[in-house]
Image (spheres, rainbow, N blue to C red):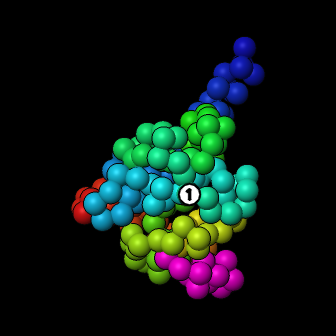
Amino acid sequence: MNNLLFKIVTLGLVLAFNLSGYASAGEINTGSRGIVAIKGYGAVAYFTEQRAVRGDLTISYEWLGAIWRFSTEKHKTLFSQNPVKYAPQYGGYCADGIALGEIVKTIDPEAWRIIDGKLYLNADQEAAAELEDVDGQLEKSVTNWPILRATLVENPD
């Protein structure tokens, strides 16, 4: 019985830790006036096809107050079963901008990186390369996100 309790507590801590870095309702980057995440591109395709793929208007899923689009029903199912696995870090804001201490809403869905199994979106290819290639840049984004995330909660626009 103690082993079961340990597993339950451990699972709870793991989930709390994993979800703490992700956006909650209202913190997903949907552009200036939109409700669609990643400008309509499918989050799962970055992992399964290793490329940016525009989602189909008819294949969507609502999560954390945003509409997520997908190119296939299979991708939608994968996302709905584990959105935290596929959702971009920092609510889909420019990850390099977060590293520089800025909330940058403008992203290019083609400017992305998967690093250590996590999706990072960026404003442009230069920012994506900087996030990956500049020593300490990714670590800066991890450090800056909680501060910038709090700013989003206080001032959603």
- In this picture, residue 43 sits left or right of residue 48: left
Foreground pick, 89 / 10: 89
Q: Is residue 100 magenta?
A: no
Specify start and end residues of the magenta stretch as a single range.
Answer: 123-137
Which residue is disc 1 drawn over?
54
Horizontal and vertical percent position of residue 62: 43, 39
Q: What residue type is disc 1 on?
A: Arg
Q: Quadrant of the N terminus?
A: top right
Count of marks overlaid on the render: 1
Foreground pick, 90 / 135: 90
Identify the residue shown where x is 38% and y is 58%.
Answer: 30
**Is disc 1 placed on a helix, strand or loop?**
loop
Foreground pick, 56 / 116: 56
Q: Is residue 131 magenta?
A: yes
**Do we see residue 69 in this rendering?**
yes
On screen, 122 above or below 83?
below
